[in-house]
């Protein structure tokens, strides 16, 4: 029978029996088996982490790089969306407001985006949602850029038309200040000098010496030049387009012909006293879409603020008109 050996354990203050060789190896074997089973279970749960080929490891690195690139792309597209939204706001609230154009509705700017998953075939992969989100956003931005580009084309066209329109609008006095004797009468109810009745005076009377030049107040085409039996005597009517017309009456001489193109500041006739008139003057009217309006609002090109205020004050005085 093998002798048993004991060793003193200072921690427990007792003697402990030493294991024999066979017992020791059995314990080592059992411990090794437990560790082996644990390692096997780990390998079984994630074999890719331990059994990847070099090519598989390369693909994993590529996927990680692609994910990082998509995340960076997504951030850049978010910044692009912010810039595009700023452009949209300026387009609607500044450019189109100045040019008197309707803003583009949001549903048009979105260009019919949404409702259909265009990248359904990419579902089921790693990072599918990130990739689909990035591609959808890129397509949405592309469509919005097309809409914005067309909008800017329209804005440029409107700006050119606006420049043309500003040149055609009546914007100066028909008789220069230096040539005026006085501004006899303005727009409103006045005593007619010939008929001696109170009636609506639809224009402004600029008194000056006979033969004083009368100027076109905006670009346009002469619609009428000559005499008509309507009390205006020799007179000119200019069609400025955009719904505007002007009338210059009681001329001594007409300097243009029907159908002639004229420019703002061009001489179209001379002050006279023809028709139902009580003295040499130019009776001037502004018509907007067929309606006669107060001409006082159309002298912003050649008068200072002080001159305009004085003219407005004189035009508001109720006195006798000259026609």
Image: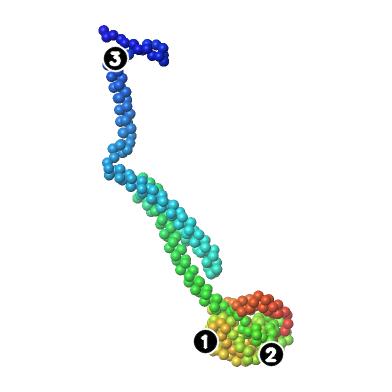
Task: First in sequence, mark 2 or 3: give its number.
Answer: 3
Q: Which residue is mark 3?
A: 20
Secondary element type, mark 1: loop
Vertical relation: 10 (above or below) 287: above
Task: Please identify the quadrant where the N terminus is shown.
Answer: top left
Please give the label number shown on residue 279. 2
> In the image shown, does 92 or 84 lie closer to the viewer?
84
Separation (CA) of disc 1 from disc 3? 129 Å
Q: Secondary structure at mark 3?
A: loop
**Mark on residue 260?**
1
As measured in the structure, the alpha-carbon distance from the residue carrying label 2 to the one carrying label 1 is: 29 Å
Q: Residues within 10 Å of mark 2 (few under 14, many from 20)?
A: some
- Residue furthest toward the top? 1
Q: Is residue 245 left or right of residue 181?
A: left
Tag 1 and tag 3, C-beta contact below 8 Å: no
Q: Earlier in the sequence, mark 1 or mark 3?
A: 3
Q: Residues within 10 Å of mark 3 (few under 14, many from 20)?
A: few
Q: Position of residue 188 (x, y in %)?
A: 69, 79
């Amino acid at each position: 029978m093998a002798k048993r050996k004991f060793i003193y354990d200072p921690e427990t203050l007792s003697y402990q029996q030493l294991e024999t060789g066979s017992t020791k190896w059995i314990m080592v074997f059992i411990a090794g088996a437990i560790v082996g089973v644990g390692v096997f279970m780990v390998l079984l749960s994630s074999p890719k982490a331990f059994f990847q080929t070099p090519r598989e490891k390369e693909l994993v690195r590529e996927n990680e790089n692609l994910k990082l690139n998509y995340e960076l792309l997504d951030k850049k597209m978010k910044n692009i969306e912010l810039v595009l939204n700023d452009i949209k706001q300026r387009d609607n609230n500044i450019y189109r407001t100045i040019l008197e154009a309707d803003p583009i509705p949001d549903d048009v700017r979105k260009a019919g985006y949404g409702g259909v998953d265009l990248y359904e075939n990419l579902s089921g992969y790693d990072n599918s949602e990130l990739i689909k989100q990035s591609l959808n956003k890129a397509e949405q931005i592309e469509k919005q850029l097309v809409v914005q580009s067309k909008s800017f084309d329209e804005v440029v066209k409107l700006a050119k038309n606006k420049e043309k329109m500003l040149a055609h609008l009546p914007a100066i006095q028909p008789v220069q200040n230096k040539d005026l004797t006085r501004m006899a009468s303005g727009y409103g109810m006045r005593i007619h000098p010939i008929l001696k009745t109170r009636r609506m005076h639809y224009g402004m009377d600029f008194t000056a010496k006979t033969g004083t030049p009368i100027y076109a107040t905006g670009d346009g085409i002469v619609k009428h030049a000559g005499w008509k039996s309507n009390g205006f005597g020799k007179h000119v009517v200019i069609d400025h387009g955009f719904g505007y017309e002007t009338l210059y009456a009681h001329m001594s001489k007409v300097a243009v012909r029907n159908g002639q193109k004229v420019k703002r500041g061009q001489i179209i006739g001379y002050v006279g006293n023809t028709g139902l008139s009580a003295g040499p003057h130019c009776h001037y009217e502004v018509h907007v879409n067929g309606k006669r309006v107060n001409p006082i609002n159309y002298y912003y090109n050649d008068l200072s603020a002080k001159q305009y205020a004085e003219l407005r004050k004189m035009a508001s005085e109720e006195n006798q008109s000259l026609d």
